[in-house]
Amino acid sequence: MLKFTLSLLLTLIIPAIAVAAEEGGVEPHMGWRVINFIIFVGLLYYFLRKPISEFFKSRKESIIQEIEEAKRLQEEAEKLLEETKKKLLKLEEEVKNILETFESMAQNEREQILKEAENAIQRILKSVEEEKASILSKAKMLLLKKMSEEAIENLKSKFKNLTKEEHEKINEKFIRSLQR
């Protein structure tokens, strides 16, 4: 602290002497002014030494505390960052698992829909086949009926043109065929 005071005094006295020297010399009362100034600085030093030193000491301590608090906060922030990174990794893993589950569910759903569609197609094809068979059966029946009616009409027309002898001949053939 003594070095500080001396350097302060020299810093203040040297410019005053330089100003006085420029004006052409030293004033007659310049010595008293310098002595007054030194006494003033000495009194300032005497009365303000403790408060200034306590101020700087408390300021130093508060800066040290703030630095320690900043370090502590930085460590907490780093811990929080690590925890957040871990949570983020877990979250990414969960998202991946959920996506895999949904993809699996979608694949199962797709397969089920395809099976149901295949079953529906099979039922429709079976129904079409049955309808086709039914239509063919009806068509055959209609065709047989039509052919039968035409055959009967044809036979009727032939029987009308037959003589009595031809009728009897046909009847005898028919009776013989029944007897066998």
Image (spheres, helix red, strand yellow):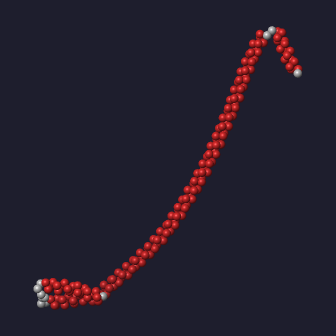
Residue in front for this viewpoint, 163 or 68 = 163
Q: Residue 16: percent from the left, percent from the top?
A: 18, 85
Image quadrant where residue 40 sits: bottom left
Give the number of callouts. 0
Q: From where the camera sits, is residue 44 visible?
A: no
Residue in front for this viewpoint, 39 or 11 = 11
Q: Residue 71: percent from the left, percent from the top?
A: 43, 75
Q: Is residue 71 above or below residue 5?
A: above
Residue 50 relative to residue 76: left or right = left
Point 39% across, 77% down: residue: 66
Q: Residue 10: percent from the left, percent from the top?
A: 23, 87
Residue 143 relative to residue 71: left or right = right
Q: Is residue 107 above or below residue 42?
A: above
User: Which quadrant of the rendered structure holds the C terminus?
Assistant: top right
Q: Residue 41: percent from the left, percent from the top?
A: 23, 87
Q: Is residue 80 above or below residue 96?
A: below
